[in-house]
Amino acid sequence: MGGGMLPKLTVQPIGLRIQTKMNETVLESLRRNGIVLQSICGGLGICGKCVIKVVRGKLSPPSEQELKLLSGKLSNGFRLACQAKILEDVEIEIPAEATIHFFKIAVEGLELPILVDPAVKEVIVEVKKPTLSDLKSDYSRVLDALKVESYVAPRLTVLKKLPSVLRESRWGVRVIYHKDLGILDVLPADGVKRIYGLAVDIGTTKLAAYLINLKTGETEAVKSMLNPQISFGEDVISRITYASDYERTIQLQKAVVGGINQLIEELCRDVNISPQDIYEVVAVGNTAMHHIFLGIPPKTLGLAPFTPVVQNSINVKASEIGLNINESGNLFLLPVVAGFIGADAIADALATRIYESNKPSVVIDIGTNTEIILNNGKDLYACSCASGPAFEGARIKHGMRAGLGAIETIYIDSDIVKYKVIGGVKPMGICGSGIVDALASLLDAGLLDRNGRFNVLKSPNLFINSGKDYEFVVADSKESGTGNAITITQRDVREIQLAKSAIATGLTLLMRDAGVQVEELSTIYLAGSFGSYISPRSAVRIGLLPNVDLSRIRTVGNTAGIGAKMCLVSYEERIKAEDLAKRIKFIEFYIKPDFSKIFLENLNFPIKV
Amino acid sequence: MGGGMLPKLTVQPIGLRIQTKMNETVLESLRRNGIVLQSICGGLGICGKCVIKVVRGKLSPPSEQELKLLSGKLSNGFRLACQAKILEDVEIEIPAEATIHFFKIAVEGLELPILVDPAVKEVIVEVKKPTLSDLKSDYSRVLDALKVESYVAPRLTVLKKLPSVLRESRWGVRVIYHKDLGILDVLPADGVKRIYGLAVDIGTTKLAAYLINLKTGETEAVKSMLNPQISFGEDVISRITYASDYERTIQLQKAVVGGINQLIEELCRDVNISPQDIYEVVAVGNTAMHHIFLGIPPKTLGLAPFTPVVQNSINVKASEIGLNINESGNLFLLPVVAGFIGADAIADALATRIYESNKPSVVIDIGTNTEIILNNGKDLYACSCASGPAFEGARIKHGMRAGLGAIETIYIDSDIVKYKVIGGVKPMGICGSGIVDALASLLDAGLLDRNGRFNVLKSPNLFINSGKDYEFVVADSKESGTGNAITITQRDVREIQLAKSAIATGLTLLMRDAGVQVEELSTIYLAGSFGSYISPRSAVRIGLLPNVDLSRIRTVGNTAGIGAKMCLVSYEERIKAEDLAKRIKFIEFYIKPDFSKIFLENLNFPIKV
Ligand code: FES
Ligand code: FES
């Protein structure tokens, strides 16, 4: 093989092809590509957990450790991934008997295979009994049985139960081990062997919780509810304002923790497990939700320059904030990037794998604050745009959330307005995607000009005059479920213009800073619930999105929840998250001298494309 | 300087002479000898904290860093200890302006200088304010200001108060930093600057607490009380028996924690500080006291092979076990060696520095269980002897603790018994040292034979016949404060024989295992309260101690308390403690085939020496 050519590694059963480095071990190659095999001994060739099977090609000759641990199995092609080095193109298989599962994350249009390798795992061990000539402590014995490389400090909750569990179970125990925190629990080896985790998406409006079996990586139940903090304020800013001191922060914290505990109770009942079987919660949320969840006053997020109190990912005893899971259970929070770029943005990046591509691409997670994460093929940039709640139906005369009775799509066909209502009932209002559709159709029909003024004279029968101003009628009072006509006002158009300009300006400036041209963008991922409903064509038509081929726009759903799940099921994703939080360059636009100029330009609608 | 000769380093103002290694830095040399200079940057030559002054001799030429940081000061002999290498004999001075204090530990006959370098320190820093172009989190800013080398996970208690403290104090803060745990607290820089620690000796019978100013290393107040656990059983075994399950262990834990909290309250009142000013508690005790203090059932300590549940030193949030100090305060427990060799034995070794000598020496810490730690000049050995409570006055007809009214010394002068009573009052009983004196005198006078039988015929007037047996009269009913004669019975002699044989047998077997002869023992340290009262001459006479020159026997007082103080005031001592726990070889005698034979031999008293 020539010096310049690097050998390729093909991994079955996922069919992944990996670019390797000459002479690196299979374990290293796999790890660099996000596939984490069990390797308890850390690659020393002692534990024998990293067994793989060679299907085609040759690896380095067996090491002493392999001869010792595999012996007969060697001739059947089995090798230790930590010992075998890559010398030429080779195809391997990760054997079914290895306790490794694949976990498929379904994102609309994406399907990411992830190896199930959670931070929390169970290990069943036979602990050596003490004898008169071996008087080590109970705790050291368990560490020895686990073959941990260096001493890990014990938790008091574990020490308290350890002596009786060891002796009652006759030294055969099931250890719940956390990669970063050591032993979380010790249980008799012959008991029920369940180990669950909970992924939580703490939205300003909604809490969503996914109960995941950590052995299989499968989501066994999902529940959601309104964030109980809503009674303290609808949006992030009002929550930050409310949580002006420590006591009020704790009030908000208790509300959200109480909500999650209720979801835990319901999820456990549905799947018939105990909250004691849940050993870890992974949570994701914007920076304000993140801080309040930890009981940290979010005051600094409401004052320029909007810095967070803590940024890195964080492990906290779940009991410390009152989460009702196992008493030794852990809470992991993904890192945040900045005051307005929260852990949800990191999750966006994780779920879309935008950071992996060497082609420019962007994720736009639309909400009251819209986060944009851009990869220019090399570096990652992010910004946050104060797009406001217009796309969620707020501040719009007949606006409503995308729920039963909301008009979600609208088109105008030769002066006749047609629409679709969620649930097929009589319309009650219009949701964000409906308004965007309406404006796109109005533009196409020449009923709305570039500056956002209705061209009433063109089809006067489509408008009514409310006295002060003209309104475009989507459904008249007879069709409507409310008894009143459902309209779009001149003011509503203005709100949408402000919202879409905020996002378009963010994207424009971000692309400028990153040196990316519109035509270079290989993919625009639309995340968040509004992003899932919106018609890409309409979004481009009103100038919310740049003018790209529609095939390049992909909606990806609730990436925050998906990112939390990924970090729960795969430890490797946490390392990526931490790395992303450091890599992403946060761009603050309000300080750019030409921000206002570009914002004004973007208020206008594009000329017909 | 010849290749074989190693340069010497003389350290002022303590006048310590250190054997160095050629080419090692002054910082390394000092550290190897237990002198820890401030070196925030870890010896990279960045922080400038490790300044020393050369008094005599030459060090390596100044490094680039030194030229940068010291510039003009170089010509005055100032150097950075982490940069300057030792090439020849040199004398240095640790400057007064360096924030290093010496802390003198007074042990009877010993005076150990220790550098005040506690695990918990305050650092006053100016934190950089965030700006629009520097949006790091509050927590990262504090870490930056502290110049910590790698990220340390935050405590939630700190994050909760951090944003308001930073802003209210205008970014000038006082950080309470723990070497192993990171930031414990953040306070305004202009407030009262107090930082205290508490060293606690948890004895089976007595609790002693020392309130120490961590800036000066000085003990500002001391208090002690009976261990409230006494109501659950007098000795260790009865406590272990009582704490048979988790609930009962917690009962005992609450008793001792309650006692310590009471001492904390009194100490704080005396010195006029708040429990909030105390940031660390360092505790020492035997293994059973250690486990119960943490709420770990001590059951395994009562069953062969008597293994502890945990052995290594341990850091626990003080609040987790209910200690009333600062809410972020830490509890550090010294490591234990084995089920019957507790943290108190490690403290014995620390306080006597027995581990440093290259001459054989031994510490004997006499109590209900007597721990012996032997250094054969190279390795450390320890054993525990079930010496029983006889030396504390228990199981002795007229025995009592060494307190008011106890006869503490006895001698017989031509058939007249003379004695001294503690407090100079009428005698109420005899304490351990009195009994040992009595037996030594009786042996000298020929009134007691080698086997422990009274030779009544020699001086019949010194004995009375209680009907069943003879008793030696120390004080008759007229002299006595109880109205009854105070005597030593034949049975009492037997109890002392059993106790002293247990200790002598332990020492004999330990010395045999370690290959040490009696005449090689350079020092015998007697520790513990009984060890402080006993007459070395009498102890040798009855065979409790081997026949060595009396000048080699030193009493060292409450080494457990001293060891706890040392670990509180000097982080380096914790490293030594951890190291000692691993180095000390625990020898279990009851399994030796000739144990009984030697034990029987040692029951006899020695022939006149
Ligand atoms: S990782 Fe343990 S043997 Fe390969
Ligand atoms: S240790 Fe920091 S300069 Fe020497």
Image: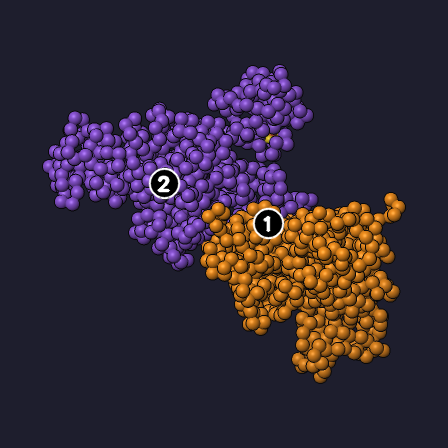
Chain colours: A orange, B purple
Q: How many marks?
A: 2
**Going by the image, does A305 lie left or right of B294?**
right
In the foreground, A103 or B457: B457
Amino acid type, callout 1? Val
In the foreground, A242 or A226: A226
Q: Which mark is residue B597?
A: 2
Tag 1 residue: A148
Q: Are marks 2 and 1 in contact (CB under 8 Å)?
A: no
Q: Which mark is residue B135?
A: none
Give the SS element for disc 1. Answer: loop
Q: CA distance from mark 2 to mark 1?
A: 43 Å
Quarter of the image holding residue B107?
top left
**Going by the image, does A222 lie left or right of B244?**
right
In the image, farthest residue toward the left = B478
Image: B577 above or below A600:
above
Percent across and percent down for residue B215 are 46, 34
Residue A239 is at least partly visible in this image? no
The residue positioned 80% from the left and 57% from the top of the image is A91
Percent across and percent down for residue B374 are 43, 34
Q: Chain of mark 1?
A: A
The residue positioned 81% from the left and 71% from the top of the image is A442
Note whether ligand 1 is within 8 Å of mark 1.
Answer: no
Residue B470 is at least partly visible in this image? yes
In the foreground, A259 or A38: A38
The residue positioned 72% from the left and 61% from the top of the image is A95
Percent across and percent down for residue B1 are 62, 15
In the foreground, A334 or B607: B607
Q: Chain of mark 2?
A: B
Give the SS element for disc 2. Answer: helix
Amino acid type, callout 2? Lys
The residue positioned 60% from the left and 34% from the top of the image is B42
Percent across and percent down for residue B174 are 52, 39
